[in-house]
C-alpha cells in the first residue's frame, strides 16, 4: 500500500470514528429546553481580550489556548486591525513590520539558492524569491514553514482571509516538526461571526492596482449553530518594471457547526489562482569571456559579474527577457477538523488537511559569450565585475569584442500534493487546589501527525546543445521561438521528469504546568519523527533513470522552558529547544552515505511585561541558535566513495591543455618555464600521445618533475591560469576522478558544516489611551559560519600521493584558493588536514542585517471637525547587509579581486517610511470607510546590492457594510 493510500485509510477510519462519536454524543444530549452555553475549545485561541494591535492569547506556542505572558517563548501576534491599517494584501506584507524577518534576501548560505528560482543566476534575489511566496528569513535562517492553523502550507494566501498571524521565533520542532530553525509563521483564518455581516472593499492605486474584496459571515440560531465566513478576492497589479503584471482570484469559505454542545466541526476551504506575466530576468550578468560550453554549464561563474546596462534603458526598470516568461499558480486547500470535550478536562482534536498546488512556468536562461552564433548578432560590450572598484581576478573590467547572448528556454510544470492528519488529546488535572503554595495546575497534550508530500516536476527545454542568440547591445525584448535577427530559434524537447515522495510521522507529548499560585509555569515536551524520502529522476536527454531511496530515519527532539512571574506585571523566562530538517533532497556526503538530518539547538532567555493596566506590553529576549550538519558543496573536494581512481596504479593525466605545445599569451607562461622538464618527459616516454591527445605518467620521475615545475611556477613566479589539467577519459587515472561534483560519479557530494545565529530582540506594544497605538520592534542578529566543512582523508595506495589532484591546484578561486600548500593543508599527504582558509569560518556569508528596527503608530480622532479620521505612520530601518560574500552560490568558489582579496560587498543602510489616513463614516445606516495607504513616502529608488527599492506606491480603498 502506498504512503498516500495509508494516509487515506487512516483518514477514513478517523472520519467514521468522528461521525459515530458525534452521533452517539448527540443522542445523549439533554433535551431540556435550556439555553446552551458553548465553552471555547482549548484548541481555539481566545481573542476576546484583544484590543487593536494588542493580543493576549496564542494557540501556536503549545497548540492550546494560552496567555502569551505565561508561555516561555517569544511569540508575536499580528492582529487583524494591524493588517488592515497597514493595507496588507497578502501574508508577506502582513509580516513586513515583524522584528528581524527578512522578506527579500540576496545572499543565503548553501548551494543552489540562486539557481532554483525564476531568472536563475540573473535574478539577484535569493531563496525568498521562491515561487511559493512562503519563504522568508528569520533570525538568519531561511524557512518556508508557513502554517494555516497549524497545518503546513507552501503557497500564498490573501490577507483578507487572515484573522491573525502568530510568529514563534526559534526552533519549534516539538509541535510542528520539520524545517523551522529560525521560527515559524502560523496564520489563523477568519471564523464565522456571531451576527450577520456583509462587507465589500474596493481599492485602486498606481502601477495598475485594482482590488475587490467581498466578505460575509454569520452564525445561525439553529440546533447545530451553523456558522460561515466567506472571503472572495479579485486583484490585478502592474509593476514599476517593464511588462510585469499579475492577476489573482481567491475564495475561501469556512463553515462551523456543532452536532452536540460538546462537539465542534470546522470545514475550511481555499481556492486561489494567480497569473504572472513577464517574470524573467531584468538584465543579465555582464561577463563575456566564458566559452559557449561554460556559459551553458557553469552558470555560477557568472555570479562574479554585475549586470549589463543599455544606454537607452534604465536598469532598475528594464526587462530584457521580454513578455513571454510567466508563472501561473493554481491551488486549493481543504481542512476538516473536529473537536470534542468529553469532560471539562478531557478534550480531543481530529483533523485532516489536503492541499494541491500547480505551478506552470516559462523562463529563459543563458549568458554572454563570444565568437559563436550569427556574426550579425555579435557586438562589443563592457563587462562589469561585482566589485567595480577593485576588479576581478578572473576577468578584466572593460570591453569584450564579438560578444553575443546565448540562451535557452525552459517550460516547467510542478504539482505538489500534500496530505496531513493530526490527532491530539488534551487532559487537564489540578492538584492541591486548596493550597496557594502547593496548588498545581497540569495540562498534557498527546499528539500524532502524519504528513505526506508528493511532487511531480516535468520540464521541457530548448534542444540540447542548441541555443538562440541575441545581440547584447540590442535592448529590444527577447521573444520565445526567435533569434535577435528574427530567424527561427531551435525547437523544444522533453528534458526530464522528477517524482519525489516525502513522508513525515511525528508523535509528541507536551506538558504545561503552573504552581506557586500560578507564578511559575513550565512547558516541556518530546517528539519523535520518522522521515522517509523516495525520488526518481528520468533524464530524457541522457536516457537515464536515477532513483534515490536513502531509507527512513528517526530523530528525537525536545523542548523545555519555564516562566517565573517576578511581579504581577513582569516575568522572566528561559527556553531550550531543538529543530530538525530531514535530508529530503537525498544528498550524499563524500563517503557516499545519505546525509543525516540538519539539526538545530537553541538557548533563549527573556523578559515579558504587561504594565499600566495592559497599556504597555512586550518581550525582550536574547538567543543563540546553532545549526549542525548543513550541506556544504565545494566542487573540487575529495570524495573517495566515488572510487573511480585506482590508487595502486600509475597516475595518468590527459595534458592536452596542459603542456608547452599549447602555450599562448593569455596563459601564465609556466609551460615555458617547464619546457626542459617536458622535453625530458617526452624523451623518457613519460609524456606520450594517444589518439591525438597528450598524456603524462605522473608516477614516472620525469612526469613528477614536469608537474612539480608547472605547479611551483604557477604558485610563485608565474601566477595566473596555465591551463585545464583535469580532462578525464578512459586512459586517465588520477585522484581527480573522485572529486565532489556530479561530473564524477553522477552525484554531488557534500561536506557537513555548522552555522550559528545569535542576538537579541525587543517587541513593544503601547496604547496610552483608546485613540493611540504604537508598535515598535527591534532585532540584533549576528549570523556566522562556525565550521566551513572538513575534507575526508583520501586513502592513497601503492601509487603514492597524487600531488596534483584538483584540491591541490594553485588557483585563487578553488583548489588551494590563493593560499600556499602548507597554509591550506597541515599535512599535504592527509587531505583531512585541509584548513578551509578563505571559506568563511567566523564570517557571515549571509545578508541578514546586524540591526533592524521597525515601528508603526496610529492615532484616531473621535471628536471635533476631524471626528472619524485616523492616521498611521510607520518606518523600517536596516543596517548594512552583506549581499555578496565572495563565494559563489553554485559551486563554492572564491571570488577574489585583482589584489587577491576576497570580494565582500555590503548594501547601504536603508530606511523606509509608510503612511496611512482613514476616514470612518456612515453611508445611510451602513458603516463605511475610505483609506489611503502610501508606501515608500520618500520615494527611495536606490539600489541596495543588486535590488532596487520600489518607488512610491499608493492604494486608495473604499469599504462599506452591505
Image (spheres, rainbow, N blue to C red):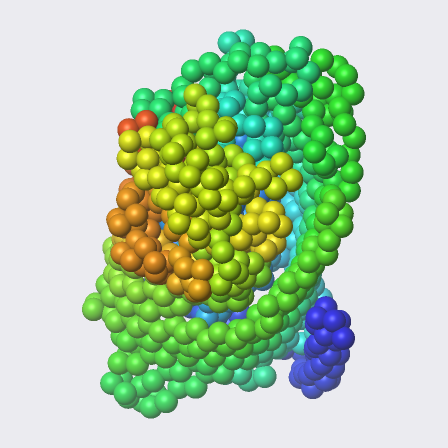
Identify the residue at image location x=73%, y=33%: 462
Identify the residue at image location x=41%, y=45%: 702
Q: Is residue 108 above or below residue 883?
A: below
In this rendered view, identify the residue nearer to me: 64 or 907: 907
| Position of residue 284 measured from the top left corner of the image (x, y, whole percent) | 54, 25
The quadrant of the image that shows the C terminus is top right
Q: Is residue 273 above or below residue 42?
A: above
In this rendered view, identify the residue nearer to me: 407 or 957: 407
How many numbered marks are there?
0
Q: Is residue 585 above or below residue 464?
A: below
| Position of residue 743 measured from the top left corner of the image (x, y, whole percent) | 58, 48
**Would you say 946 lies left or right of 408 here?**
left
The quadrant of the image that shows the N terminus is bottom right
**Would you say 237 lies left or right of 185 here?**
right
- Residue extending farthest to the left is 566
Q: Quadrant of residue 264?
A: bottom right
Q: Quadrant of residue 828?
A: bottom left
Residue 761 visible at all: no
Q: Is residue 751 above or below residue 102?
A: below
| Position of residue 112 measured from the top left corner of the image (x, y, whole percent) | 52, 45
Identify the residue at image location x=44%, y=64%: 798
In this rendered view, identify the residue nearer to me: 354 or 476: 476
| Position of residue 523 measured from the top left corner of the image (x, y, whole percent) | 37, 74
Amino acid at each position: 500500500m502506498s504512503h498516500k493510500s495509508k494516509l487515506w485509510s487512516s483518514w477514513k477510519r478517523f472520519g467514521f470514528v468522528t461521525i459515530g462519536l458525534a452521533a452517539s454524543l448527540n443522542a445523549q444530549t439533554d433535551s431540556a429546553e435550556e439555553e446552551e452555553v458553548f465553552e471555547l475549545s482549548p484548541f481555539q485561541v481566545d481573542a476576546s481580550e484583544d484590543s487593536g494591535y494588542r493580543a493576549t492569547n496564542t494557540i501556536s506556542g503549545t497548540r492550546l489556548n494560552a496567555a502569551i505572558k505565561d508561555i516561555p517563548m517569544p511569540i508575536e501576534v499580528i492582529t487583524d486591525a494591524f493588517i488592515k491599517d497597514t493595507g496588507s494584501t497578502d501574508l508577506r506584507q502582513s509580516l513586513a513590520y515583524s522584528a528581524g524577518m527578512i522578506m527579500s534576501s540576496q545572499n543565503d548560505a548553501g548551494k543552489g539558492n540562486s539557481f532554483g528560482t525564476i531568472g536563475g543566476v540573473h535574478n539577484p534575489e535569493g531563496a525568498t524569491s521562491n515561487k511559493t511566496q512562503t519563504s522568508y528569513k528569520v533570525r538568519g535562517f531561511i524557512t518556508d514553514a508557513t502554517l494555516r492553523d497549524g497545518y503546513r502550507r507552501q503557497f500564498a494566501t490573501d490577507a483578507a482571509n487572515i484573522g491573525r498571524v502568530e510568529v514563534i521565533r526559534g526552533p519549534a520542532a516539538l509541535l510542528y516538526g520539520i524545517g523551522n530553525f529560525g521560527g515559524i509563521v502560523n496564520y489563523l483564518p477568519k471564523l464565522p461571526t456571531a451576527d450577520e455581516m456583509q462587507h465589500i472593499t474596493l481599492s485602486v492605486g498606481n502601477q495598475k492596482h485594482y482590488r475587490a474584496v467581498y466578505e460575509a459571515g454569520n452564525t445561525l440560531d439553529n440546533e447545530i449553530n451553523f456558522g460561515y465566513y466567506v472571503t472572495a478576492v479579485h486583484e490585478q497589479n502592474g509593476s514599476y518594471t517593464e511588462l510585469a503584471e499579475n492577476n489573482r482570484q481567491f475564495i475561501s469559505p469556512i463553515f462551523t457547526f456543532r452536532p452536540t454542545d460538546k462537539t465542534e466541526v470546522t470545514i475550511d476551504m481555499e481556492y486561489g489562482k494567480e497569473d504572472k506575466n513577464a517574470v524573467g530576468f531584468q538584465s543579465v550578468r555582464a561577463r563575456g569571456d566564458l566559452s559557449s560550453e561554460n556559459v551553458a554549464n557553469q552558470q555560477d561563474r557568472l555570479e562574479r559579474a554585475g549586470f549589463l546596462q543599455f544606454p537607452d534603458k534604465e536598469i532598475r526598470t528594464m526587462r530584457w527577457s521580454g513578455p513571454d516568461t510567466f508563472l501561473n499558480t493554481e491551488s486549493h486547500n481543504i481542512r476538516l477538523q473536529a473537536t470534542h470535550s468529553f469532560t471539562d478536562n478531557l478534550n480531543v482534536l481530529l483533523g485532516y488537511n489536503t492541499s494541491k498546488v500547480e505551478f506552470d512556468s516559462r523562463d529563459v536562461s543563458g549568458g554572454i559569450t563570444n565568437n559563436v552564433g550569427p556574426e550579425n548578432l555579435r557586438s562589443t560590450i563592457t563587462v562589469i565585475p561585482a566589485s567595480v572598484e577593485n576588479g576581478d581576478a578572473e576577468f578584466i573590467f572593460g570591453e569584450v569584442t564579438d560578444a553575443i547572448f546565448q540562451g535557452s528556454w525552459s517550460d516547467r510544470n510542478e504539482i505538489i500534493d500534500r496530505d496531513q492528519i493530526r490527532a491530539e488529546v488534551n487532559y487537564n488535572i489540578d492538584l492541591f487546589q486548596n493550597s496557594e503554595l502547593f496548588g498545581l495546575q497540569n495540562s498534557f497534550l498527546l499528539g500524532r501527525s502524519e504528513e505526506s508530500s508528493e511532487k511531480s516536476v516535468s520540464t521541457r527545454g530548448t534542444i540540447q546543445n542548441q541555443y538562440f542568440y541575441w545581440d547584447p547591445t540590442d535592448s529590444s525584448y527577447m521573444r520565445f521561438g526567435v533569434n535577435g535577427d528574427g530567424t527561427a530559434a531551435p525547437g523544444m524537447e522533453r528534458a526530464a521528469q522528477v517524482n519525489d515522495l516525502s513522508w513525515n510521522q511525528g508523535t509528541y507529548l507536551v506538558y504545561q504546568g503552573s504552581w506557586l499560585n500560578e507564578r511559575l509555569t513550565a512547558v516541556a515536551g518530546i517528539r519523535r519523527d520518522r522521515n522517509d524520502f523516495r525520488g526518481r529522476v528520468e533524464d530524457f536527454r541522457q536516457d537515464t533513470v536515477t532513483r534515490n531511496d536513502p531509507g527512513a530515519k528517526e530523530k528525537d527532539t525536545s523542548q523545555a522552558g519555564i516562566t517565573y512571574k517576578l511581579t504581577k506585571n513582569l516575568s522572566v523566562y528561559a527556553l531550550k529547544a531543538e529543530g530538525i530538517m530531514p535530508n529530503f533532497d537525498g544528498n550524499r556526503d563524500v563517503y557516499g552515505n545519505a546525509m543525516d538530518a540538519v539539526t538545530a539547538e537553541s538557548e533563549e532567555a527573556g523578559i515579558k511585561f504587561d504594565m499600566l493596566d495592559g497599556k504597555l506590553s512586550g518581550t525582550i529576549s536574547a538567543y543563540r541558535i546553532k545549526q549542525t550538519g548543513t550541506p556544504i558543496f565545494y566542487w573540487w573536494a575529495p570524495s573517495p566513495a566515488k572510487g573511480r581512481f585506482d590508487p595502486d596504479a600509475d597516475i595518468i593525466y590527459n595534458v592536452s591543455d596542459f603542456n608547452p605545445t599549447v602555450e599562448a599569451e593569455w596563459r601564465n607562461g609556466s609551460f615555458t618555464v617547464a619546457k626542459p622538464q617536458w622535453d625530458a618527459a617526452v624523451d623518457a616516454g613519460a609524456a606520450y600521445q594517444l589518439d591525438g591527445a597528450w598524456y603524462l605518467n605522473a608516477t614516472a620521475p620525469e612526469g613528477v618533475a614536469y608537474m612539480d615545475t608547472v605547479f611551483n611556477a604557477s604558485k610563485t613566479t608565474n601566477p595566473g591560469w596555465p591551463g585545464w589539467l583535469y580532462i578525464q577519459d578512459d586512459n586517465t587515472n588520477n585522484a581527480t576522478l573522485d572529486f565532489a561534483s556530479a561530473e564524477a560519479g553522477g552525484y554531488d557530494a557534500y561536506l557537513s558544516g555548522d552555522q550559528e545565529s545569535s542576538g537579541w530582540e525587543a517587541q513593544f506594544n503601547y496604547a496610552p489611551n483608546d485613540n493611540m497605538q504604537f508598535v515598535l520592534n527591534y532585532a540584533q542578529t549576528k549570523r556566522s559560519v562556525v565550521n566551513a566543512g572538513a575534507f575526508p582523508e583520501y586513502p592513497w595506495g601503492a601509487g603514492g600521493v597524487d600531488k596534483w589532484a584538483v584540491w591541490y591546484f594553485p588557483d585563487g578561486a578553488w583548489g588551494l584558493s590563493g593560499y600556499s600548500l602548507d597554509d591550506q593543508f597541515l599535512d599535504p599527504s592527509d587531505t583531512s588536514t585541509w584548513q578551509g582558509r578563505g571559506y568563511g569560518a567566523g564570517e557571515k556569508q549571509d545578508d541578514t542585517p546586524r540591526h533592524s528596527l521597525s515601528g508603526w503608530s496610529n492615532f484616531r480622532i473621535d471628536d471635533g471637525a476631524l471626528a472619524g479620521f485616523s492616521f498611521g505612520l510607520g518606518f523600517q530601518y536596516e543596517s548594512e547587509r552583506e549581499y555578496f560574500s565572495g563565494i559563489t552560490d553554485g559551486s563554492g568558489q572564491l571570488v577574489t579581486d585583482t589584489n587577491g582579496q576576497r570580494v565582500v560587498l555590503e548594501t547601504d543602510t536603508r530606511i523606509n517610511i509608510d503612511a496611512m489616513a482613514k476616514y470612518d463614516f456612515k453611508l445611510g445606516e451602513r458603516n463605511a470607510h475610505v483609506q489611503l495607504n502610501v508606501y515608500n513616502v520618500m520615494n527611495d529608488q536606490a539600489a541596495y546590492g543588486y535590488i532596487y527599492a520600489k518607488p512610491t506606491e499608493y492604494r486608495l480603498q473604499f469599504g462599506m457594510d452591505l
